Amino acid sequence: MGNNHASPRRRSTQPSERDPMNAFLSLSGRILALLLVLTLPLAAQDAEEGVDDRPGVAILPFTDGGSFGADREDLAALSVGLQQILITELQQNSQLRIVDRSVLREVLEEQDLAEEGRVDAATAARVGQIVGARYVVTGGYMDLSGDFRLDARIVDGETTETPWSDYVRGDRSDLYALLVDMAGKITSGADLPALPMEVREEREARPIPPQAITLYSRAQVLQDVGQTDRARELYQRIVSDFPEMTEAGEALEQLDGEA
């Protein structure tokens, strides 16, 4: 009988039971790497641009509730003058994002909402949604022969609810101090970060008479309607007569930049 030699065992060429898993993991790794390649530039772009997640606040024009005892034109101009001064006061707080008045004016005009008395809670909330402001401030004022009162309320731009309302009242000669006080009340009413005390004290110490606020308000109205030469004259008058009101100088720089 011939010798029986066992055939040499051949290594199987079939994939092992673990090969499908290895293939899956390899594919997953390639997909993950691709996603990283695609998303990292976008993330870097967002980081460079910076997403402003500060709470947004919009101050709408105020309504004259029936003032008397002063020049009618001056009283009407306070509608936007008080609005802009409150915006400026709130802008001193770097923890808040305050919507620029020019943006609000454009939205009100585009949405046909600029007529006096038309800004109810639902309308205010809609404006807030358009400009990305959670808190929208509306209100009115009355000047009764020097007895000045300013009312304000906050409308929640997401729910249209009015969680807060308050007022300040005093002699018209203290108008600027009343506005600084109202800015603090708005911040507190919305449960927002407060302006540092030292900054508020600096603002309150500014000796700004009501005449300066009146001139500034009229200049804002003139600037809105395109009468920039007359607006510039009033701003220059404020800079000369009431230099403490630095907002006038800033407005002049803005006009010069647009020229």
Image (cartoon, grey):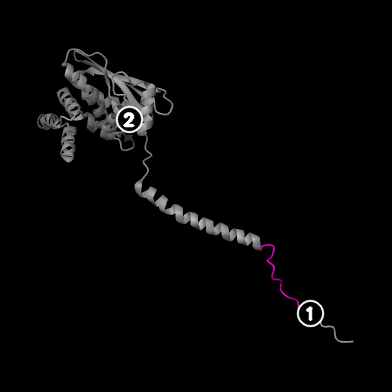
For residue 225, which numbered disc appears in the image?
Answer: none
Which labelled disc corresponds to residue 7? 1
Residue shown at the point (36%, 30%) measured from the top left? 128
- What x and y, as percent, mark residue 250? 18, 36
Distance of label 2 from label 1 (alpha carbons)? 89 Å
| Residue, disc 2 | 58
Residue 156 quadrant: top left
In the image, the segment drawn in magenta is 8-18
Q: Main secondary structure of the magenta part?
A: loop
- Residue at image point 50% right, 58% down: 33
Q: Is residue 36 left or right of residue 206?
A: right
> Which percent across, then down, holds residue 202?
22, 33
Q: Position of residue 140 (x, y in %)?
A: 28, 19
The quadrant in which residue 186 appears is top left
Q: What is the quadrant of residue 194 in the picture? A: top left
Place of residue 18 in the rendered image (x, y in percent of width and height, measured from the top left): 67, 62
Looking at the rendering, in which quadrant would you find the N terminus?
Answer: bottom right
Amino acid on which the number 2 mark rests in the picture: Ala
Q: Is residue 150 visible?
A: no
Amino acid, disc 1: Ser
